[in-house]
Image (cartoon, grey):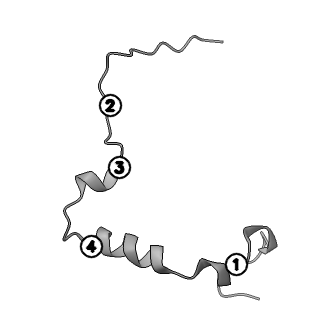
Amino acid sequence: MSARFVDRETPMLLPPDMRDWVPEDDLVQFVIEAVHRLPLEVLPPVESLKEDTVAGEN
């Protein structure tokens, strides 16, 4: 087993929030907001989905 060394002096490579790198008028901001507004409670729980189901087939 190899040791993993951590340099605590290395600054963060990514911002705490990736949205900090995206301009306010970027399309991704719209997508984030649209997904946030989706009524996810109407979707079935992941456990109830069949693994062998292919999109478009029943």
Q: Tag 4: Cα neighbours inside 10 Å, few (<14), some, or many (≥20)?
A: few
Q: Which residue is mark 2?
A: 12
Q: What is the C-alpha distance between the residues marked 3 and 1?
A: 34 Å
Of the pair 1 and 28, the residue shown nearer to us: 28
Q: Which residue sits at x=78%, y=72%? A: 52
Q: Which residue is mark 1?
A: 54
Q: What is the C-alpha distance between the residues marked 3 and 2?
A: 12 Å
Q: What is the C-alpha distance between the residues marked 4 and 1?
A: 29 Å
Q: Which residue sits at x=73%, y=69%? A: 46
Label 3 vs 2, first from the N-terminus: 2
Instruction: Tell whether label 2 touches label 4 (CB within 8 Å).
Output: no
Residue 13 is marked as none
Of the pair 37 and 53, the residue shown nearer to us: 37
Please name the amino acid that badge 1 sits on. Answer: Val
Residue 17 is marked as 3
Q: Which residue is mark 4?
A: 27
Label 4 vs 3, first from the N-terminus: 3
Q: Which residue sits at x=39%, y=14%? A: 7
Quadrant of residue 19 within the rendered picture: bottom left
